[in-house]
Amino acid sequence: MQPRKTDLARTALQAHRAPLDMRQRRLLILCDGQRSIADLTGLMGREAPAMVIQLIQGGYLETGAGASPAPSSVPKTTPQPTPLPPASPAPGVQVERRRSLVAARIYLLGILEMQRNPMAAALFRDLQQARAEEDVVKVLQAALQALPGMTSDGYCERVRLRLLEALPTEHCDAFAATA
């Protein structure tokens, strides 16, 4: 079985408004009709088959001969996304999410770099130069507090949620107040 994206998946990946978590988005990107479930499991981990099933049930993926044509020949319709529950592993499988302060830092550096704002540039430099763990956390918090002044509330919330997915759990409590 080689899952392939549907029109709904392409729309969701372009719009960034679908109810998908970061791992589900990564899996959708990897599902190109060329990779098998075994390949996806090697790339994404043991929870990949369960996530594929969830995405198929949500209408984001399809398999077999009914797969849609290439994106250039897809009719332009706007399907309504089906809300998906967060990706969960098969029963009895313990999944350890990779969390690190470095990953959170790199993610927020990328977000700040995209903002065309002097405050974002200053926070970018501060985050690059921060070396001690507590300094990095302080700059991450300052950046999250400054971001609403640079961009939309919805975008800020998505950034905050993605950052919380990447942060080590011991630092997540410090970011609860920035919600």
Image (cartoon, rainbow, N blue to C red):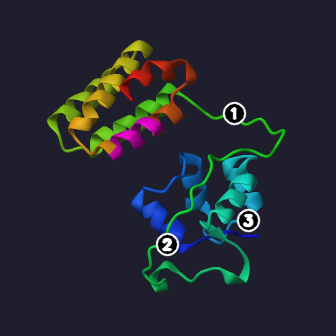
Residue for badge 1: 96
Which mark, by number, is residue 79? 2
| Measured Cα–Cα span from mark 3 to mark 2 | 26 Å
Circle 3 sits in a helix, a strand or a loop, which is it? loop
In this view, the residue in front, 57 or 99, is 57
Q: Main secondary structure of the magenta part?
A: helix
Closer to the chain start, of discs 2 and 1, is 2
Nearest to viewer (mark 2 / mark 1): 2
* In magenta segment, residue 97: no
Which residue corresponds to mark 3? 36
Residues at marks 2 and 1 touching, judged by CB atoms closer than 8 Å = no
Q: Please, what is the three-letter code of the amino acid marked with disc 3?
A: Ser
**Quadrant of the image for the C terminus?**
top left
Residue at figure coordinates x 46%, y 37% from the top left: 161
Q: Residues within 10 Å of mark 2 (few under 14, many from 20)?
A: few
Residue 166 appears left or right of 119 = right
Give residue 160's position: percent from left, percent from top. 41, 35
* Segment tinted magenta in the rendering: 154-161
Which quadrant would residue 37 be assigned to in this image? bottom right
Vertical arrangement, residue 70 with respect to residue 49, above or below? below
The residue under label 2 is which amino acid type? Answer: Pro
Q: What is the x, y in percent for residue 135?
A: 36, 15
